[in-house]
Amino acid sequence: MSSVLLDALAGVLSPVSILLVLVGTAGGIIVGALPGLTATMAIALLVPFTFGMSPVHGLVLLGAIYTSAIYGGSFSAILINTPGTPSAIATTFDGYPMARRGEAYRAIVTATIASVVGGLIGVAFLIFLSPPLARASLRFGPPEYFWLAMFGLTIIAAVSPRSTLKGLIGGGIGLLISTVGISPIDGATRYNFGTLSLQSGISLIPALIGFFCIPEVLRMVEESQHSGEMIPYKRQRRMVKRVLQQLVRRPWLMIRSSVIGTLVGIIPGAGGNIAGLVSYNEAVRASRDKASFGQGAVEGVAASEAANNASVAGALIPMLTLGVPGAPPAAVLFGALLLQGMRPGAELFTTYAPVTYAFLFSLVLANLAMLPLGLLLGKGVARLMQKVKVQTMAPVIIFLSMVGSYSIYNNLGDVYTMVATGIVAHVLRKAGFQPGPIVLGLILGPIAEQGLLQSLLLGRARGSMLMVFFARPISVVLIVLTVVSILAPILVQIRDRRALRQGPSSGGTE
Amino acid sequence: MTARARNAVAALAIIAVSVFWYLEAGRFRELSRIFPRVIAVILGGLGVVLLVLTILGRGPKIIMAEGDSSQRHRRSGSLLAALVLWTALIPVTGLLAASLTGVAVMGLITFRAHRGTIRAIIIAAVSVVAFYFLFQFLLYVPFPLGFFG
């Protein structure tokens, strides 16, 4: 084991890896800071670039971009009251009021330090939890994998913004799309409508680019960004030391926010935005000075940023160990792993252990690099936010989407797949369906189908379907979790409706 | 289109696709058709639930963007048409020529609302050419050349 860790360290501490971490971190901060450009889009566009790199270098670059783009979102949240990425929504609550009263630099420094601390705590969880979880996945048989896929889909539906029903339907659409191509059990060709390009199924990376980039570009063009007044960004001396002293006096705030971020990140579909909001809410509940939140409280910025950066590592835990991505950027990283010939699960921590650990260690480096790079690039990033109109980048993003889709297998059919999935995703978004559940359905479809069919064959051989599907301990746990994830949002909705009906008569306390 | 109408259309489309998927699965062998049929039944059922809730006026809410919706839809519709044209041109004229045409058309659609349309189109076109040559000569990607090949 120690030789594996040494190999991984050597891989990540090579000059090329360090350069990629620095480039990825700087690029991620810029992408995250520009409203309209998301971490998912950046990773999806870059995956084809990494195809020609070694697995370590490719993953190091993508990991650095993922981590730093989530942090980069805090710049626009603080300076123009518009979250650069959805993860920074809660940062606007106190970040922008701080900036308005002349404390923009203090808010940025707070966000930077909190992001670094949150990110490092999240990565620590990732490094220590992933290997035992991956080992546990060896006990999974076909029925467990089937129920795991079901749980992944129902939980993403449960945490879908606005509608559980639409989340479930989105997951179903993804599963349906996953059945196009060759059947995993008997090799029959399905739903190819007589075309050769659909015979091997829908290519994952072009579909991911289509689902995550095209609707975003169209949204960019449709809506002009309504942002608040841009607050000037001026550096102040000794601010890092002052903020650090302030945060050190509140260790629980940082630890609690980071743990919340990691745990929320593990839940498929929850992502950084929910992590930030839950953590912010907990910071308000735990504070003695609740009234200061929303008026520019340092604790509000720290809670949101520590949690959303911790959620990055959290989202990678189920992806690396079980093949269930915790967030859309992790889903794209899942595709990047497959492209490099690596399958998530126990194999990542045995056969590919040096590559996997190098990737995990690189996340530590990327988080550490955010501190100097975030503070040094801050002024330039603020100037870019003022000058660049993201709408004008739309044609270039579409060109990169085409080139990226084509260059994986030099296949024009993949460009058609990307464009078609992009148009479908745009139309579905208009009807209120988010791409996250659809993509998760697409990823989990083959796992679910293989699990279902192998379990059926197993049940037939043993003469009892019931025993195979419902009597194994891990299956029972996953079934209970699946049922809870379906019922919980429905019960919460019923409770909220009742509270709303009773609200006016009972009167509020605050 | 109102949120209610969008929900109704989406529900009907989902039911139609599910029925098609279910019937099409009848052509496959036994093991190949089980999963698509199970998913089609579940998805069709969810589509029916969405339709019933919409008819009862309790369908999920859809957040609509603010501002003039007809202008927004015209812009995204034009962009979609340009995207399809761009894609269709690739096998005919090759990726570079198709992309430069696509960038020019898209530029006119997207940049019109901003100042410096021509400058923005030129910057976009230069970026496209730079990325094209980066992939072609540094990453050795053999792009389609169309009638230039």
Image (spheres, coloured by chain):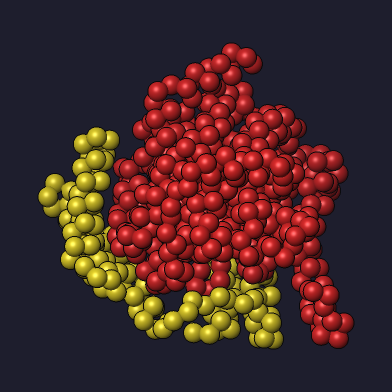
Chain colours: A red, B yellow
Name the side, left or right, on which A408 lies relative to A483: left
Image point (69%, 86%), residue name: B56
Residue at the limit of the structure toward the top, as seen here: A3
Q: Position of residue B19 (x, y in %)?
A: 59, 70
Name the side, left or right, on which A453 lies relative to A80: right
Q: Relative to A46, is A388 above or below?
A: below
Q: Position of residue A274 (x, y in %)?
A: 65, 57
Please indicate, yes or no, whether residue A435 appears anywhere in the rendered image.
no
Image point (24%, 57%), residue name: B124
Which quadrant: the C terminus of chain A?
bottom right
Please indicate, yes or no, whether residue A2 appears anywhere in the rendered image.
yes
Name the side, left or right, on which A303 lies relative to A462: left
**Quadrant in the rendering for residue A436:** bottom right
Q: Position of residue A109 (x, y in %)?
A: 53, 47
Name the side, left or right, on which A479 lies relative to A56: right
Q: Position of residue A394 (x, y in %)?
A: 33, 61
Total label count?
0
Which quadrant: the N terminus of chain A?
top right
- Which of A101/A417 is in front? A101
Residue at the limit of the structure toward the front, as seen here: A237
Q: Relative to B20, is A133 above or below?
A: above
Image point (87%, 82%), residue name: A506
- Which of A492/A138 is in front? A492
Q: Relative to A229, is A29 above or below?
A: above
- Which of B59/A60 is in front? A60
Image point (21%, 36%), residue name: B137
